[in-house]
Each structure stands twice: as structure tokens, then as C-alpha cells.
Image (spheres, grey):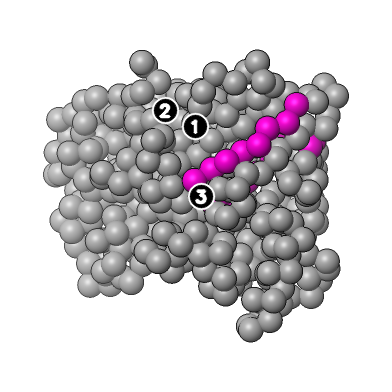
Amino acid sequence: MNTILGDSVTKAARTALDAGNGILRLAPAWVPRSFLQPGKRIKLHPEDYYAYGKHRGGIDERWFASTTPADNEGAAPDEGLSYAVHEGSRFTLRDAVQALGGEVIGDAIWNEYKRWPVYSKFFDNMGPIPHHMHQSKEQAALVGRQGKPESYYFPPQLNAIGNNFPYTFFGLEPGTRKEDVRRCLDRWNTGDNGILDLSKAYRLKPGTGWLVGPCILHAPGSLVTYEPQWGSDVFGMYQSLVEGRDVPWSLLVKDMPADKHKDLDFIVDQLDWEANINPSFKDSHFLEPIADGDTAKEGYVDRWIVYGDVRGEQLFSAKELTVQPGAKVTLRDNGASGVITVQGRGRIGNLPLESPTMIRFGEMTEDEVFITAKAAKEGVVVENLGKECPLVLLRYFGPGVNPKAPKVGDYKK
């Protein structure tokens, strides 16, 4: 497939957008992680989980509408970037945004950020991820990076089995002191440093989610997770062993200033202590889906699955659209969105949609698109062409797009 670069992207992107009526077809973007074991539920062919080579680790993530490169040792410059595909050629969504700006992502986001500042992914692991945090924008700026708040939703379609540990540790138990965490870091090389002894695990339930701000410790469990988040790949791992596997010190300090890599007090102070020891942690972060209107009789339901503010800002949000067989709906959103199909067969605008059974590495699919801001506001028709199966789409939005979205806790009303 021909890769388009440089000044030619502008013409190619406009041609693709004209053909798709403001919608871009995106190719799968697969990402490996060297410190994790793939859960093998994101439809990649069994022979392809180590397509990047065993030294790179197994593929346990697929990134959606991403203009953010993966921060992996040994990665190619375009690892993690989404490619738009049209008539045998491809170009990155990042290049399309840079070429066309507000035409793709909306003037408000372009004028503020000059990029698509968010992305989403599936992550799928056999067991838990190390207890870690993501730096705030102020902390990340110390090393020239972006901070990373994030959110989780557990799609039922991909979670028929929970794998080894469908529980997530969040935060620290109330009463935990800084010196307790410092002692864990001090014994990093003696085996299990015991950081999970200071935390609490919550059972994960398909069809629910969580909103997690920066500087909060979390050890995500083994459900397949849809994860809208800020466009960054910063983190600090605070757990030295996971299921007997070593977590190197370098993964704790990789996004901290070089002169602080051995400063335990600095590392401990990277945590948001008030948020981590919050005695009402679940009430402050847990999400249940909330239907946007009473539309079931019309053959569809559009539910908020990610909502709420992070430190007073709505940085991202997400919805799950379910369209019954033979039904159609015209979506009118306030801004651009990245879309992934998790069930069924249908059409969006004039582009086919189908959730595949199995995907070979490098193979094109018809399950992912990007809806530009202009198309979203004008209205996009989604139709279920299946006879028995609902068509289910997940789509996520950028910052400030949905000011009328619910707040954390509104599911209880």
C-alpha cells in the first residue's frame, strides 16, 4: 500500500473525506508491551501476537483514532499511529489533522491544541498490569511530555471470559502514609515490594467503567478494556513484581527528570495523596452507563459510558450506540469522534461497518472510522444491515465537546 507523506497529504485527505462524506476509514493500529502477556481476546490471529518479534513483547493493545505514538523501546516512529486508508493509499490521521486542522477535528480543538489531543484503545491482558500512575500535565512538562488522565469501559462483547485477575487495585487505603510507600520503593530489588498491601481491589463488571485522573495509582485487571484517554503514553510503575515477572526500575522513573531517578521522596510526592487515599474512592470514580434519551422504541439506544470531569475539565467522553436489526439512526454530535465497531454489521454514511471474527496482522478491516467535526454536526446515518444481531459502536470525543454529558455519580439518579 502506498504511504502518502508531506504536502501530498492535504489533497489525499480531502479526496478521502469527499468520498466518505466527512468520514475516514482507519486501519487497525496494533501495539505490543514487553512487560505484559496478551489476553488474546481482541480478535488478532493467534499466530500474530508476536508479529513485532518476541523481543518486543506480545501485542495486547489496539489503538483507535490515534495521533499519539507508542512510547515503547525499539518502536518504529509510527507505532501506535492510526492510518486512514483510501483507494490503495494511506496517510496517518496525525498528518491529516496537521494538514486540514479544524476541518477534521473542529476549530475549537484545533485552535486550543493544534492536534487531536486524545485517543482510545483496547488493552487485553492475561493478568493484571503493575500498580502505576500517569503524571499530571505539570509533572509531564518537566520532561517535555503531556500528562495522561484516562477512563475505562469493559465491553461485554469482548469479555466472555475474565482471564486470570478481573479485579483492579485503585489508590491507597485511607491512613496510608508517605513513608509506607517509600519503604516499598526502598525494597524494590528484594522481590515483591508489597505496594499492593497498601491498596484495595475492586471487582470489574462488564458494561461498567471508571474515570481515573492523573497521579492516582491503579493496577488494571484482566478484562478487555476500552480506554479513552489523553494523548500521551507517560507512566510510572510503582510495583516491582507482577505475577512473578520483574518490573524494572526504569519503568518507574522513565517520565521523571533524570536527576530525580533515585530520589524516593520526589517519586512518592508524584502521587496525588488526597485522591489516592480518598475513603469514597468508588463514589468519585465509578461509571454506570446512562442512556441519552428514551429512544429504545425507535430501534436504538445511545448510552454515555465515559463522562465526568478530571480536575474540573471534561477532557474526553464516550458513548456506546446500539442499533437493532433493520433500524437506522442519524447521529448528530457536537464534535469529531473515533469509532470502533464491537458487534454486528451495518453502514455509517456510505461506508460499510462490520465487526470481524479474526484479524491478521497488517490486514485491513471495516470496523473503524473517524467522524470529522463537520460531518458529526451535520448528521451521520448509522444503519444495522444485519437480520438478528444488534450493531454496537463505541465512539469517543475530544475535550469540551459534550458539556451536557452526565457527571460522575449521575447514574444513581
Q: Would residue 308 appear left or right of 32 to someone viewing this image?
A: left
Q: Tell me the residue that label 3 is attached to.
A: 335
Q: Considering the whole magenta stretch, tell me its main secondary structure.
A: strand
Q: Give how far apart the Cα atoms at labels 3 and 2 are.
A: 22 Å
Do residues under tags 1 and 2 come within 8 Å of each other at their CB atoms? yes
Q: Nearer the viewer, residue 79 or 319?
A: 319
Check disc 1 and give the amino acid type.
Answer: Ile
Q: Look at the numbered disc 1 and give the secondary structure of its residue.
A: strand
Residue 348, how many percent across, how many down? 73, 43
Q: Which residues are magenta?
A: 327-346
Res. 274 visible in picture = yes
Res. 184 visible in picture = no
Count the numbered circles shown.
3
Check disc 3 and give the amino acid type.
Answer: Gly
Residue drawn at point x = 24 percent, y = 38 percent: 276
- Dividing the picture into quadrants, the one containing residue 113 is bottom left
Tell me which label, 1 or 2, sits earlier in the chain: 2
Residue 249, how many percent across, how many down? 36, 59
Give me the disc on residue 305: 1
Give me the disc on residue 213: none
Magenta-span inclusion, residue 298: no
Q: Tell me the residue that label 2 is attached to.
A: 287
